[in-house]
Image: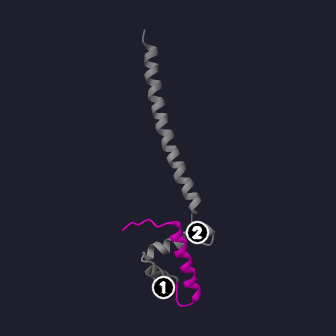
Amino acid sequence: MNQKYSPEMRERALRMLDEAKASGEHSNLMSAVRHVAGLLGMSAETLRVWHRRREVDAGAKPGVPSDVTEENKRLRREVAELRKANEILKAASVFFAKELDRP
């Protein structure tokens, strides 16, 4: 099931995870993740991914930060649009060049 959570829910879940880790009740990160995810009725994998993304964005773990990923997506969309525009302009220039060649 693919469910979209609000940013507030994400922050709450991550805050609860931080508190669970700090309490010392859990032997490792995944134990705390499973506990908090169970309390909130969400997938443990979702919470683990959010935690990992936060660490990458903070520079604590290696990886591509979210802002760079979003910029890449935006630039890829822009390149695709520009390529389409170029194809249209090429087709138009061929069409008009043929019109100019006619006697």
Q: Quadrant of the C terminus?
A: top left
Q: Which residue is mark 1?
A: 31
Is 70 located above or below residue 23 in the figure? Answer: above
Query: Which of 26/20 is in front?
Result: 20
Q: Amino acid at mark 1?
A: Ser
Amino acid found under the numbered disc labelled 2: Val
Q: From what the image shows, is residue 71 above or below residue 49?
A: above
Q: Position of residue 10 (x, y in %)?
A: 52, 70
**What residue lies at 48% left-to-right and 35% top-to-bottom?**
85
Does 27 sit left or right of 41 as displayed? right
Give the image location of residue 78, x and y in percent: 52, 45
What secondary structure do most residues of the magenta stretch adopt? helix
**Please, is residue 23 above or below residue 17 in the view?**
below
Residue span colored magenta:
1-28
User: Is residue 69 found left or right of 5 in the rendered image?
Assistant: right
Residue 44 versus residue 96: which sits nearer the camera? Answer: 44
